[in-house]
Amino acid sequence: VQLQASGGGLVQAGGSLRLSCAASGFNLDYYGIAWFRQAPGKEREFVAALRWGGGRIRYADAVKGRFTISRDDAKNTVYLQMNSLKPEDTAVFFCAARPLWTTNYDRPYEYDNWGQGTLVTVSS
């Protein structure tokens, strides 16, 4: 079971990035997949989540209207499209997975599998 996150980088405020989370080694049917982020000196915080089989998509208030989570079934990959980036979005972004959706989708402890993180830096 492996999650590989990629797509981070340096971008100016107002710019866009797309993060990818490629899953391998397990069937994603009914899995909950989420993105979290952790800024220096801060706790890991929820960004967005979806249920692989559809029907559930959730966002943190701080990113609603700017970020979009999506999936590609053929590639076993979840994406996080980030638009209108702000300096306060600067963080290491992690993808995470758990079997079955949970109402506690925004809690890091609910997730069994984590990717290695990808750094997003937004300059002002």
Image (cartoon, rainbow, N blue to C red):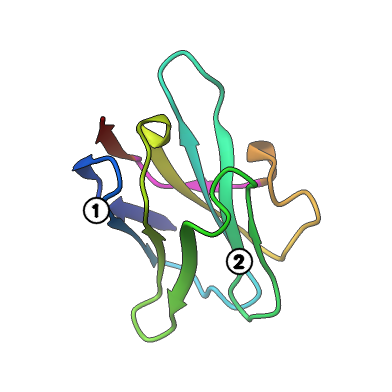
Disc 2 residue type (three-letter): Leu
Q: Give the labeled residue for mark 1.
A: 7
Q: 11 above or below 103? A: above
Give the residue at x 28% y 40%. 13
The residue lying toward the viewer, choosing from 54 and 122, is: 122
Secondary structure of the residue carrying tag 2 is strand
Disc 1 residue type (three-letter): Gly
Secondary structure of the residue carrying tag 1 is loop
Q: Is residue 112 magenta?
A: yes
Q: Give the labeled residue for mark 2.
A: 50
Quadrant in the picture for the C terminus: top left
User: Where is residue 101 drawn, in percent x and y?
Assistant: 72, 64
Q: 45 above or below 51? A: above
Sequence-first disc among 2 and 1: 1
Give the residue at x 43% y 25%. 39
- Whether residue 3 is visible, yes or no, is yes
Q: 99 above or below 13? A: below
User: Can you tell which mark lies on residue 85?
Assistant: none
The residue lying toward the viewer, choosing from 2 and 109, is: 109
Q: 63 above or below 124? A: below
User: Where is residue 57 drawn, in percent x and y?
Assistant: 65, 67
User: Where is residue 72 drawn, in percent x and y?
Assistant: 40, 80
Quadrant of residue 88 within the rendered picture: top left
- Most frequent secondary structure within the magenta stretch: loop
- Whether residue 32 is visible, yes or no, is no
Give the residue at x 59% y 47%. 112
Disc 2 crowd rating (10 Å Cα; few below 14, some 14-19, many 20+) is: many
Quadrant of residue 25 within the rendered picture: bottom left
Disc 1 crowd rating (10 Å Cα; few below 14, some 14-19, many 20+) is: some
Give the magenta part as a residue range.
111-117
Q: Is residue 88 magenta?
A: no
Quadrant in the picture for the N terminus: bottom left
